[in-house]
Amino acid sequence: MLGPPGAGKGTQASAMARRWGMAHISSGDLLRDNVREDTGLGRRARPYMERGELVPDQLILDMMAERMAQPDARAGFVLDGFPRTVAQAEALDGLLHRTRQELDGVIYLGVPEEEILRRLSGRLTCPQCHTIYQVDTMPPKVKGTCDKCGSALEQRGDEQPEVVRKRLRVYEEQTAPLLAYYQSKGLLREIDGTIGVERVLEAISRLVQGAREAV
């Protein structure tokens, strides 16, 4: 799943994982878990995340390789937030080659900057189960409380407007070239990320079904 911060990658990746019995592997969730648990990786990654910068490739690659090797990923997985640079994409190609796997497709969710800022200013995240809410479009049943596990919802520090704008600049500079990379491989499929959660998921479903029928 590719797209700018707030495009809906996490929401759609979670829905895909439930629908097809795949593992949802979110680099952002893994990083935040490590920061919260104060692991060695978390301590190294924290300064970058607080500044809205990309975490160095090697930290991400080590973490993702370990996660992708876990049993629940053997039946397939959807990657959310990774890769973020062409260098990471090339490293992912090498990892998949060594494990005799390949990508079925790369989905890009396109969303304008002003819509991103609106979404993130009202986004709340559960720190325990990572469920995402949006106060206008997907509010929790009880204000400030996760529907799934009852934890208190939070707004992440990297979703403040000034940090979001910096994340968008970083995205354009370092992540957007991935579109050309995967376009050249014939893997990229673009979906309008503003058409609503259910319509986006149905569009993704058609793409996934088409990829499976082509195998």
Image: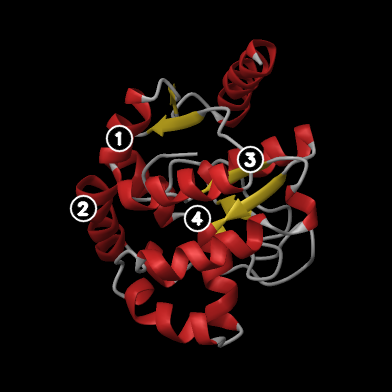
| Amino acid type at mark 4 | Arg
| N-terminal-most mark, 4 or 2 | 4
Q: Position of residue 144 (x, y in %)?
A: 64, 65
| Amino acid type at mark 3 | Arg
| N-terminal-most mark, 2 or 1 | 1
In this rendered view, identify the residue nearer to me: 109 or 183: 183
Of the numbered discs in the image, which one, if any, rests on residue 100? 3
3D distance between C-alphas at marks 4 and 1: 17 Å
Residue under label 1: 112
| N-terminal-most mark, 2 or 3 | 3
3D distance between C-alphas at marks 4 and 2: 20 Å
Number of on-image labels: 4
3D distance between C-alphas at marks 2 and 1: 13 Å
Badge 1 crowding class, 10 Å Cα cut-off, few under 14, some 14 to 19, many 20 or more, is: few
Residue under label 4: 123
Residue under label 2: 169
3D distance between C-alphas at marks 3 and 1: 37 Å
Q: Residue at x 65, y 61 (%)?
A: 67
Residue 212, located in which quarter of the rendered image?
Answer: top right
